[in-house]
Structure formats: structure tokens, C-alpha cells
Amino acid sequence: MRALHKITTAAMMVTLAGMMGHVMQNASQFGLASQPAGLDVAGLTNVTAVANIADAPAGVEVTGVRMGVVAELPALPRRTVAADAAIGPLPLAEAPPAGFARCAAPTLKLAPAAGASVLLSISAPCAADAAAEIRHEGLVIPVQLDAAGDWSGLVPALAPVAGYALDLPDGQTLATAIAVPGLEAVNRVVVAWTGAPAFLLNAFERGASWGGAGHVRAEAPGVPDAAGTGWLLSYGLAEEGPHLQVYTAPAGLTGLALDLEAPVSDVTCGTDLRVGMRRVIAGRAEASEEIAVAMPGCDDRLGDVVVPLPDLPVSVATN
């Protein structure tokens, strides 16, 4: 814009100079050597109209013209170009709602474990904190996934080549299988039921008494890699969901007695309880059986109902 101001000023000065020459020439022609009093055109802005004296109407006598100094156009202050405001980094796009977040596909992994069992590992990020079910040879094993959607633990094997299926809450099912070495070297008893945790499986090894050394139960389950002793696995989540307990012992263990205990409570009194039993003897699975237990009335809520279970045969097929 400043360059345009310079050009405009120069053009006006050239025009004014031309008009001054024209006016002075006309003044000399008409003998206007001096300025008459009362006529002062200094500071007139419409100089072109005054300079064009030749165009004046007839009868008008011009007696004198004095041209004042033409004022220069005032210099406009220089404008300071404002600096562009800092924009800063563009905001990041918001993360999609949790319901639309993508997560890794679920996985089911199996590995052989001690005691002719299987270490089963679940990874299901989309099912964090959810309950899931593992199915194997007619058994339903309930498990609780953690905040990352993971679960890992021992599960029993009822067949030399054991297949497992994982049922997730969203309807997905994963299935895989694994060979289980050493199944012929153990005896295994499974009791399973649906509903309240109404049963307790007890194993008395080598003539053990109640609560003594060798009494394997939920409160003292033992460990699978202890030589010459048995161990117990327990599963169950919801009051009305599936429950099961699995006892495993070396096939050559002697002096072993098993029973099923049903405590009398507000939930069990006056009812007929039913529980299924499965056995694997030296690697051979037997047919399942159902055991019915008639519980005493609710006027007598003390004590337990104890049901003896068949003895496990002693096998020499053990290491």
C-alpha cells in the first residue's frame, strides 16, 4: 500500500505543476502582474476547477490569481503486520467408546501338567471379568476371567487324548485337544452337580482319620506333584451354577477310603440332592453314575449326611 501512496502523490504534483504553468501564462496574457486584494486560492483543494480559467463563463473578468504552496499529502503511519497467532498442535482424535474398541481374538492353550492333568490357559481380552465355561468329556468347569480376560489353571483329564472347549459369554467357542501322558498311572474320581455348593468329597489315605494327616479335602487339597499321595481340585462360582470336585491318587495307593459329605443347611434341608460321579481307573474311563441323597427335614439342621463311595481298585500300573 505504501508504494501506491508514492505514485498517487507524484501524479498530483505533475498535474499541479502543469496547472500552475497554465495559470501563470494566462495571468501574463491578461496583464495580471499583481494579485488583487481579497482573492487567495492557497489551500484550495479543487485546483483543477480554478486553473481552467479559459472555461469561465462570458462576462467574468479575472483580475488576479495567487497560487499558494500545495501541501504535501500526509504520510500515513506504517502499519505493523500482526504476527499470526500460534495455532499449536492439532487436537488428537478422541478414542472410540469402549464398546467399539477392538481387542485381540480369544485364545485357548493347553500344556501337559503333573498328575496326568492339563494346564489350561485362556486369553479373552473382550471378555474381561467375565465368567466362562470349559467343557470336557461331559464335565462343565466354571472359571472366572480376570480384568485382562485371562485365566490359567489345572483341569482334569478323563481321556488319554483330552479335548477341551471354551464357551465365552458372547457365544464364541474355542476347542482344542492334547495328549495326556501318565493317565494310566492314576485313579481319578469326579463328583459334579448344579446348584448350591452342597457336597464335599473326602479321601482318607492310608487309614487316615477325620482331619488327620492323609485326609484330603477342600480345606487341605494337597498338591499334584507330591509322591505317593493324592490331591483335590474344586470348581464352582455361582450358587446356582455348576460345581465339581476331582480327586486324583496314584493307582497303586493302598488303604484308601472315599465318601461324599452333604451338610444339612437351610438350603439343603428337606430336599433330595443329586450328584453325578465319574471314575477313571488306570486310564480307563467308566460310565457315569447318579447318586441321590435324601436330606433330613428342616427341623433338624445339625450334622451331615455321609455317603460312602466305592473303593478304588489298586493297580500295579504305576511308576
Image: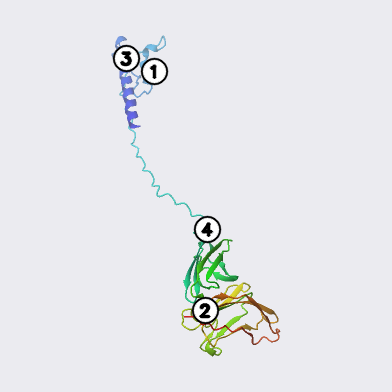
**Colour scheme used in the picture?**
rainbow
Which one is in front in this view, the residue at disc 4 or the one at disc 1? Answer: 4
Residue labelled with disc 4: 98
Which one is in front in this view, the residue at disc 1 or the one at disc 2? Answer: 2
Name the residue rendered at 57%, 71% in the picture.
Answer: 141
Residue 85 against residue 251 in the figure, above or below = above
Residue labelled with disc 2: 186
Q: Answer with mark 1 or mark 2, whichever residue precedes in sequence.
A: 1
- In the picture, the disc for residue 22 is 3
Give the spatial CA distance, label 3 vs label 2: 132 Å
Name the residue rendered at 52%, 64% in the picture.
Answer: 176
Residue 2 against residue 275 in the figure, above or below = above
Label 2 near label 1: C-beta < 8 Å?
A: no
In the rendered structure, the answer to whether residue 311 lies left or right of residue 69 reads right
The image quarter containing residue 193 is bottom right
In the rendered structure, the answer to whether residue 123 lies left or right of residue 8 reads right
Residue 305 against residue 71 in the figure, above or below = below
Under circle 1, the secondary element is helix
Residue labelled with disc 1: 49
